[in-house]
Every structure is written in structure tokens, then in C-alpha cells.
Amino acid sequence: MTAHRTVRLVLSLLAGLLLAGTVATTAQAEDGYRFWGYYQWSGGQWAFAQKGADGVVPADGAVEGWRYALGGAKPRVPRAAGDFEDICGKTPAETGKKRVALVVDPGTPADALSGETPGPATGTCVVTDVQATGAKILAAAGPVRIEKGLTCGIAGYPAKGCGDQVKNISVPATDEPVTLQINAAVGSTVVPATAESDDDGPPVTAIIAVAVAVVVLAGGGLVLSRRRSSQQS
């Protein structure tokens, strides 16, 4: 084989590889999946988790995120920021436990399966043992549907399907931010300081109201008594 033929052969192979790479990239960009993505809040932004939720042990003060979306190669992250103080700021810390903020974003109607309607994005403070994994933290906040080791449904959404492939997807360049609906904390055993127990007697406001009523009635009776005395004299 001559040098010229060798060069032509190498160039042909390179051209073929480049063409194959272009075709593969185009096909990947056109196809996507509907699935729950798992993320961690780090450095002021969401990062796609490098491990499954059952292999991650979040630290105290961490923020975990889940987003249901129709996506391809580019991750579609939760549409709300992972603000730990906003989600867990009112939940007291407990000895021997950790607080982890959990963000669950069901996505948009455009991401949904036919007949499914996504709910609001929520934030929940989960108080749990220090060794709890991301999977345990998610399960503490509500029911999780698992199929073949995949997280397929969270809090009943979606009711069916799991990582289904979708052809010729159209993914927006960005998603509009949303405000989280903050749920009550789960796993906390500390009673908030503002809570009042029925065993402690009537609320202070009720006692004050009764006292005011007594004073008003007593004052009215005194005025009436004086009027009668003046009339008799």
C-alpha cells in the first residue's frame, strides 16, 4: 500500500468516525426520558447526584432535591433554590439527629404524562438519624414508588410509568423559577415553644378576655349603683 493510499484511508476512517459521532449526538439530542432526577444543592446551585439516593448519606444542614422532567443529556434541575433556612429554619435541631431540607419538584404540565397533573414544588424539613441515606430521607416525607431499583413515583406522582423513553423531545432552554410550598417538618420530636397544651389550662388570651369582661361588668354595676343612690337622696 502506497503512502498516498494510506493517507486517504486514514482520512476516510476519520471522516467516518466524525460522521458517526455527529449522527449519535443528533439522535441523543432528539430522544429523551421522563424521570425523577436526583440532585444536591452545592455552592449556590443544583448539581446532579453522582450516586443513587441509597448510596448517599447527606450531612446535617444539607439540601436534597428531586425533579420530575422530560429531559435528555442536560439535567433539568429543581426550579426553586435549595434554601435550608427557608425550609428548616423554624425546625429545632435535636441531639443525635440531623436536619435535611428536601425539595421535591414535580415539574411542569409539559413534562407530564397524558392525564397527569403535577402538583406544586414543595420543601420539607426532615429530621432523622445521622446515618440516614437520601432514599430514607425521601421516604420519610411521603410514599415512594420504586421499580427495578429506580425512583418512579414520589407522593403518588406520576401514578404510572418509569423512565419512559420519548422520541423527538422539545426541552426549554431554561425553566421559570417557582416558589416552594413549605410543608410541616417530619420526624421532629421537639414541641415548638409557641404550642400550648390543653392540659395547661385555658390560653392566656382567653383569661385576659374574661378579666376584661369582669372589669367592664363591675364598672357598669358600680355606675348603676351610684345613680340609684343619687336618685334616692
Image (cartoon, rainbow, N blue to C red):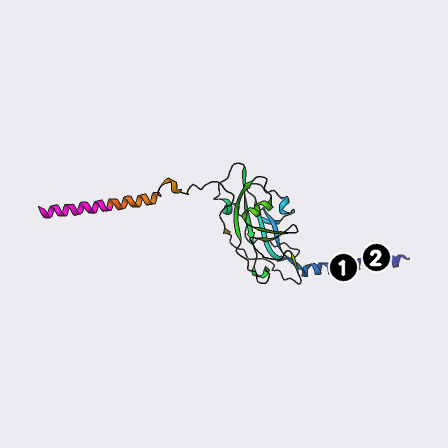
Q: Nearer the viewer, residue 41 or 124?
A: 124
The reply, left or right, for residue 171 in relation to residue 189 is: right
Contact between labelled residues 1 and 2, with CB atoms less than 8 Å apart = no
Judged by its main secondary structure, the magenta piece is helix
Span colored in magenta: 216-233
Number of residues whose C-alpha sits closer than 10 Å to that of mark 2, classed few (under 14), some (14–19) or many (20 or more) = few
Q: Secondary structure at mark 1?
A: helix
Q: In this rendering, does residue 210 appear at all?
A: yes
The reply, left or right, for residue 48 in relation to residue 207 is: right
Q: Position of residue 27 (x, y in %)?
A: 71, 60
Q: Is residue 131 above or below residue 74?
A: above
Point out the image quarter for the N terminus.
bottom right
Q: Secondary structure at mark 2?
A: helix
Provide the residue designation for mark 2: 10
Q: Position of residue 21 (x, y in %)?
A: 75, 58
Provide the residue designation for mark 1: 20
> Which circle, 2 or 1, is nearer the viewer?
1
The reply, left or right, for residue 207 in relation to residue 165 is: left
Direction top: furthest residue: 95
Direction front: furthest residue: 199
The residues tagged by marks 2 and 1 sit, at their Cα atoms, a distance apart of 15 Å
**Three-letter code for the amino acid on which mark 1 is drawn:** Ala
Q: In this rendering, does residue 44 appear at all?
A: no
Residue 91 among those drawn in magenta: no
Q: Which quadrant holds residue 68?
A: bottom right
Q: Position of residue 39 (x, y in %)?
A: 60, 49
